[in-house]
Image: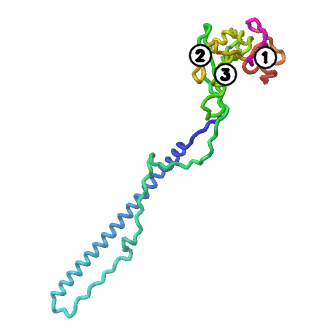
Amino acid sequence: MLVRHNTTLLEQAVDLAVKRSAIPTLQAQAAAQEKTARATAFRRMATGGAIAVAAVGIGLGINLGLRDKTLPEPAVLPTIEQPSDLTSPKDEPPIPVPTPEPTQEQAPQADVPTRPDVVTVDFNKFATKNVEFQGTTWELITGHHFKDENDETWDRAWCYSRRSVNGVDVNVSLAARSAPTAPPAGPGAAAQTLQLVGLDDSSAVDLATRCAWLDGRTFASSEIIPDQSREQAATVPAETPATEVDPDSGFVVVSGWDAIGNDLPDMPTSTT
């Protein structure tokens, strides 16, 4: 099964952490720009004050000159030199205003490269149910196979249980459905396997009526049809089969029943 992870939130968190670390630098730049603006304003005010004082002095001199008729010629007005660094407000570059740091709600979305979606195919979903049957607890496991993740329903399903016999887990196939519209067929386990776990055909069918199918359907014993693919074998007494120890491998050899795993020749491989 393929699992996809979305890293968009992680990338946004990393981008936000980087921008927050730049806040002290932006604050220092804003403070320096504020000091520069204050110095420029003070220089302008000082220049304006000097011009005002000179204008007042010129006005007083002209007034006194007009009143004094004995002066042969008017007084020469002094020339006021402007400071060389005085510039017009229009010639000064605008003071840049620092852009406020975007908040978490305003953080820009990171560009995520687009790629085609990957569809998960051939996967199973399982439903587990514990029931009381014949004075003991049985765990019924119902599996459902889906062709791909876009399917609205499964295409086949099966129900089984597991019992421990002499320390070995025995898989007991109870029923199977070939389609969502098909009734269950069972039991699928051989007669010897059913006898090992204390069941027969009738009790296995009765137990199969309690399987938990994903579509929520329930079936009576009369609705469960015989499994045509079931392995047919002669009936043997319901007792624990004889066991023997293989002198070469050291494993216990049991015949006449189905075990889950480790039941193939020369398996598992011994490392001792």
State which quadrant residue 168 falls in: top right
Q: Position of residue 127 (x, y in %)?
A: 60, 22
Residue located 25% across and 76% down the image: 53
Is residue 230 inside the magenta stretch? yes
Q: Quadrant of the N terminus?
A: top right
User: What residue sits right under mark 3 in the picture?
Assistant: 177
Residue 241 shown left or right of residue 184 in the figure: right
Across and down, in percent, residue 154 comes to 63, 28
Residue 272 appearing in the image: no
Of the numbered discs 2 and 1, the one sitting upstream in the chain is 2
Q: Amino acid at mark 3?
A: Arg
Q: Amino acid at mark 2?
A: Asn
Residue 239 seen in this snapshot: yes
Q: Which mark is residue 251?
A: 1
Amino acid type at circle 1 is Phe
Q: Mark 2 to mark 1: distance in Å?
A: 33 Å
Label whose residue precedes the other's in the sequence (1 or 3)? 3
Q: For the view shown, which residue lies furthest in the right direction?
A: 248
Whole-percent x and y of residue 10? 54, 43
User: Which residue is more in the foreground, 98 or 178?
Assistant: 178
Measuring from the top left, give residue 71's x and y in whole percent.
19, 92
Report crowding for label 2: few under 14, some 14 to 19, many 20 or more residues within 10 A (C-alpha).
Answer: some
Q: Which residues are magenta?
A: 228-240
Q: CA distance from mark 3 to mark 2?
A: 20 Å
Mark 3 secondary-structure assignment? strand
Q: Secondary structure at mark 1?
A: loop
| Quadrant including the C terminus | top right
